Amino acid sequence: AEGIRVALIPTRSAVQGIAALAVHEPERRFDEDVVSMTSAAGATRYAEVAVAERQSWTMAGICQAGDVLGLVDGDVAVIGADVTATARAVLDRMLAAGGELVTLVLGDEAPASVADILEMHVRESYLAVDTVVYRGGRQGALLLIGVE
């Protein structure tokens, strides 16, 4: 009634929402902007690093409570003991398929050094890839990773 149009951009992770916002252009026609934002979200692969709460069967094997899990597109891909090492393994797995930009969203419980270590790893190992880091505050995962 007030002439305000709204569209939902389908995402499965906050990093996909960040990718959609990054291409948003208020001056662009609404429908074109929605298509562009949806395309950016859909092209962003996502992962998260979290701590297992209990023993469980996963796609990567059996994990124990307290193990660090690296989930790629929602499936456990890496089981480790260290947050930084697990995050690096997840990042390498994701970047093996290519990418130009890595987005890291740190939760409050993430180790303070993880962002710096991952940024340095990307800079040294993937020359044409940029990294951006956000503080995510309280969230379910220690770390969210997006690769565009």
Image (tube, grey):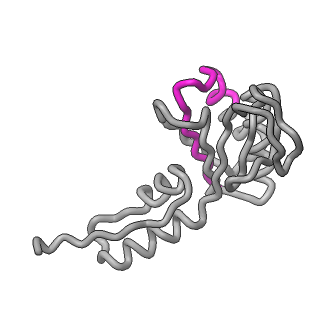
**Residue 135 shows in the view:** no
120 or 84: nearer the eye?
Answer: 84
Which quadrant of the figure has residue 144?
top right
Residue 47 picture location, percent across and down: 66, 48
Which residue corresponds to the image point at 49% horizontal and 37% vertical from the top-left? 134
In the rendered view, does 34 fall on the left or right side of 143? left
Q: Point out the image quarter for the N terminus.
A: bottom left
Which residue corresponds to the image point at 72% horizontal and 51% vertical from the top-left? 72
11 or 88: nearer the eye?
Answer: 11
Which quadrant of the figure has residue 28?
bottom left
Specify start and end residues of the magenta stretch as a single range: 100-117
Which residue corresponds to the image point at 76% horizontal and 37% vertical from the top-left? 88
Q: Residue furthest top?
A: 112
Question: Please, is residue 126 above or below residue 113 in the view?
Answer: below
Asked whether residue 109 is drawn in magenta, I would say yes
Residue 126 picture location, percent across and down: 75, 46
Which residue corresponds to the image point at 48% horizontal and 35% vertical from the top-left? 136
Residue 131 picture location, percent across and down: 60, 43
**Residue 89 shows in the view:** yes
125 or 77: nearer the eye?
Answer: 77
Question: Please, is residue 114 above or below residue 26 in the view?
Answer: above
Question: Please, is residue 17 above or below residue 138 in the view?
Answer: below
Asked whether residue 62 is drawn in magenta, I would say no
Q: Residue furthest right?
A: 61
In the rendered view, does 83 fall on the left or right side of 136? right
Q: Point out the image quarter for the C terminus.
A: bottom right
In the rendered view, does 102 fall on the left or right side of 126? left
